Amino acid sequence: VWLKCTQTFYLHVTDTNIQLQNTYFLTWFGLFVFFVFVIFIHILFLIDQTSDLWNKRHSVAIGDVHECKLIRRKEVTSKQVDQVWKSMTIAHLQSALGLETLEGVLNPVHVNGKHIVHNVFIVNKTGIVVLENKDMPYWVVSAMKCLANCECAFNIIADYFQRLKEPLLTFHLYDVFVNILSLLQVQDMATEALQVSCLLLPPPNRRRLQLLLRLMARVCQNVHLPPLNDTIATRTLMVQMFSHCVLGSPDEMDLDELLATKLVTFMMEHHSTIFQVPNKLRRQVEEHMSHLKRAQIKYAGSDTDFSASPAFCKQISRVECEEQKVIGTQTPLEELLDGLIADKELPIKDKRKRLKQFQKSYPDVYHSRFPTEESKAAVKMGKNVRLKPHLMFLNLRKPSQPFQRSWSFRT
């Protein structure tokens, strides 16, 4: 049929005088077009089947894909950024020191996340912290710049640092830097620990420490500078003069000088690296911050809901409000009192002192837990007291009351 139609079409559109052998060419051309058309239809059919098979496979694997919507998280606040840097820096410090816990070494309350962020980002091209308001006096900075070539400015700089109220490494971080002394034999570990620890310093202290250590290193490396002292070498003089200005404790003065000398010597030799931010810490914080900023996809019917649900309030009476206020404040105080009594590691003397302070501060809570004088005395003597529920009726006979017979055993 296809051949016949092709010949008919050819006879209608061409001159009748053309020879019949040309019809064979058009016949084969028509067959070629027909086969191409069939192959094209077959390819479309295979593509359709392949797409159906893909949908079936993935519907079995992940289920039917429901309607979804893109939910963007709220912008990360500066307070959250400070908290992330604080928590991850403390964790990195614990790992660098090789300790299971930082208890007794560093109190997280004394760590300010804003200081860490300032020390990381607000720096100049050389990596020195830049301060907006509180900076070193200009005459001290000028003296530090010219000391490398003039020994007359040495006393000016020494007098400035010796008048500081506390060492540059602060009293709160004293135990942290003392623990680093055990790592000085391994240069990489000590350098990483110092990098993290110096991030905890307040920005003014970090800037002064950076300038001081750089000054000490340049003075020691300047071979053209005349000796600052006739009997003591320049390197030894610099360390002895400024070591107690860097590390110190208000208690152990003799031991502090030896520890400070050892630590300051190491910090002066590696001053160009200890103030760099660890790459691992920076990468971890950046990954965490990108996760907080990443958009979320919520599917219809899923339990996870990233959008904030509206909150509703129900008005209550004044009596109910007072009851809730009493219950909400009394329960934690009772738990605190129970924990104080159950603490077996606390000495009896300290326990009595704290119980007396608690009784003075919260007399109602204390009286509700110990309504009788016997129970109060037992607690103060350190005996184990079984705390009974408040609604339990008191015994009619006191435990300390002697036994009384109502009849005689004699016959």
Image (cartoon, rainbow, N blue to C red):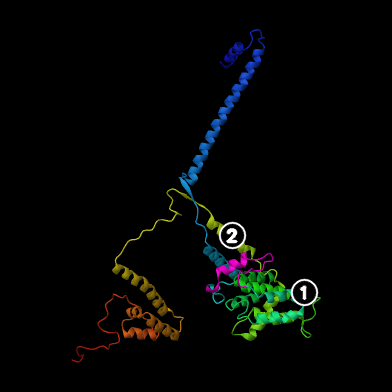
Reply yes or no: does residue 181 show up in magenta: no
Q: Position of residue 156 (x, y in %)?
A: 70, 81
The quarter in which the N terminus is drawn is top right
Relative depth, front residue between 13 and 117: 117
348 vs 143, nearest the viewer = 143
Task: Give the Cα separation between the discs numbered 1 and 2.
Answer: 38 Å
Mark nearer the viewer, 1 or 2? 1
- The residue at the far bottom in this view is 410
Q: Could you tell me which residue is drawn at 61 percent across and 62 percent down?
A: 282
Specify the amino acid type for callout 2: Glu
Position of 95 with respect to 152 (left or right) is left
Q: Which mark is residue 221?
A: 1
Which residue occupies 55% across, 34% down?
Answer: 47
Decide: few, some or many residues near mark 1? Use Cα within 10 Å; few <14, some 14-19, many ≥20: few
Q: Which residues are magenta?
A: 109-134
Indicate which disc, 1 or 2, sits on the residue closer to the N terminus: 1
The x and y percentages for residue 389 are: 32, 75
| Marks 1 & 2, CB-CB < 8 Å contact | no
- Residue picked out by circle 2: 286
- Horizontal side of 244 relative to 224 (left or right) equals left
Q: Amino acid at mark 1?
A: Gln
Q: Is 378 rendered above or below residue 221? A: below
Dividing the picture into quadrants, the one containing residue 380 is: bottom left
Q: Nearer the viewer, residue 358 or 125?
A: 125
Q: Is residue 117 left or right of residue 381?
A: right
Q: Secondary structure at mark 2?
A: helix
Crowd tier of the residue under label 2, counting other residues whose Cα lies within 10 Å: few below 14, some 14–19, many 20 or above: some
Q: Is residue 51 above or below residue 363?
A: above
Is 133 within the magenta?
yes
Task: Tell me residue 256's x, y (percent).
Answer: 64, 83
